[in-house]
């Protein structure tokens, strides 16, 4: 199974990861533990999560699963929404408490999706002040950001005066047809040695549901890009086994195979029709819950 280097951090991480947004979906919390521990026992060592997923329950469940020595076996990533230093600091502490750990390996700014988000993050009293203080205090090790809306916003963040450790973005076989992160952002990350975290490899499932590609093709496509990690949602054992099988048997697609897959998806994917996270507000947690940016509460 393939492990890759996480940009300039030098950390070695599994080429595939399980997404934290799915961690709280099983009805039985013990099923969540089973999925996470099976993933780790199978070699996955990168875990994704976020302060706001399922009102914090996703982190709570992951923290439970990481007991009994499992925490020491993983590179743990989570995200915060706060755009003020006070909110961000409080959210960082909540993440640590829920995940039952004294440090987060990688903390990312979640949902950088508004054109003015970069200015707010770096403003006096903004998110970055809390992140730098937390890093100085040993609460976090590395800093990155995420977003799913528009590559222009990612490029704006990359233009700020900061040495990012990682960047997370949608990378999949339909991305090239509308506001492409693969075309516009990925080359910048590779050039600068920033860790590439690919998310939504199945286009939030729409590529598969609309029969433009199989789940296996989608995962192979994303893993064939110069990603450090491809994060995929696994809310059941069969879905986890599918991801593990692709990782275990992975052979990169050839450039011709990647071109053919993009061509096959082109007609159905024009204008972002299969990428609601780019074209609608359905995936925009912080836009639908603006109080998350200024408080440490996930309740309305």
Image (tube, rainbow, N blue to C red):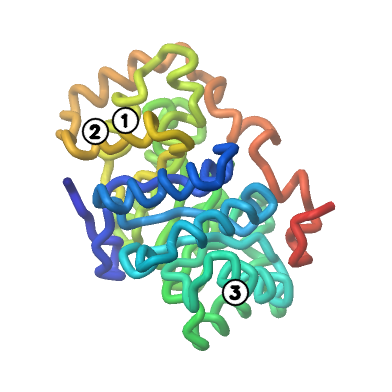
Q: CA distance from mark 1 to mark 2?
A: 5 Å
Residue to which mark 1 is pinned: 242
In the drawing, what numbered circle is on residue 245? 2
Mark 1 vs 3: CB contact within 8 A: no
**Residue located 34% across and 28% down the image:** 218
**Residue located 41% across and 44% down the image:** 35
Farthest-out residue, right: 300
- Note whether residue 224 is visible: no
Label 1 vs label 3, nearer the camera: 1
State whether residue 275 is above or below residue 148. Answer: above
**Residue located 69% across and 52% down the image:** 55
Residue density around tag 3, few if under 14, some if 14–19, many if 20 or more, within 10 Å: many
Q: How many marks?
A: 3
Image quadrant where residue 123 sits: bottom right
Name the element at disc 2: helix
Residue to which mark 3 is pinned: 128
State whether residue 42 is above or below residue 104. Answer: above
Q: Is residue 20 left or right of residue 223?
A: right
Image quadrant where residue 292 sits: bottom right
Tell me which numbered mark, 1 or 3, is placed earlier along the sequence: 3
Name the element at disc 1: helix
- Residue 82 at x, y percent in the picture: 69, 65
Residue density around tag 2, few if under 14, some if 14–19, many if 20 or more, within 10 Å: few
State whether residue 259 is above or below residue 48. Answer: above
Q: CA distance from mark 2 to mark 3?
A: 39 Å
């Amino acid at each position: 199974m393939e492990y890759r280097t996480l940009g300039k951090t030098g950390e070695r991480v599994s080429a595939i990861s399980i997404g934290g947004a799915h961690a709280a979906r099983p009805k039985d919390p013990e099923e969540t533990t089973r999925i996470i521990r099976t993933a780790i026992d199978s070699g996955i060592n990168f875990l994704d999560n976020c302060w706001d997923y399922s009102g914090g329950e996703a982190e709570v469940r992951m923290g439970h699963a990481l007991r009994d020595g499992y925490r020491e076996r993983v590179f743990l990533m989570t995200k915060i929404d706060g755009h003020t230093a006070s909110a961000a600091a409080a959210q960082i502490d909540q993440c640590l408490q829920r995940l039952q750990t004294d440090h987060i390996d990688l903390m990312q700014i979640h949902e950088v999706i508004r054109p003015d988000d970069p200015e707010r993050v770096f403003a006096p009293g903004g998110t970055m002040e809390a992140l730098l203080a937390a890093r100085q205090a040993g609460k976090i090790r590395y800093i990155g950001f995420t977003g799913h809306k528009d590559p222009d916003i990612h490029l704006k963040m990359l233009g700020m005066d900061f040495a990012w450790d990682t960047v997370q973005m949608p990378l999949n076989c339909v991305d090239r047809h509308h506001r492409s992160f693969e075309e516009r952002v990925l080359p910048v990350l590779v050039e600068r040695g920033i860790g590439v975290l690919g998310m939504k490899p199945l286009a939030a499932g729409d590529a598969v549901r609309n029969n433009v590609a199989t789940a296996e093709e989608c995962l192979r496509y994303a893993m064939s890009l110069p990603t450090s990690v491809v994060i995929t949602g696994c809310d059941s054992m069969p879905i986890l086994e599918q991801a593990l099988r692709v990782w275990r048997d992975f052979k990169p697609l050839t450039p011709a195979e990647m071109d053919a897959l993009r061509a096959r998806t082109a007609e159905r994917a024009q204008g972002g029709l299969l990428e609601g996270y780019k074209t609608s507000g359905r995936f925009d947690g912080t836009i639908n819950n603006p109080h998350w940016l200024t408080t440490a509460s996930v309740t309305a």
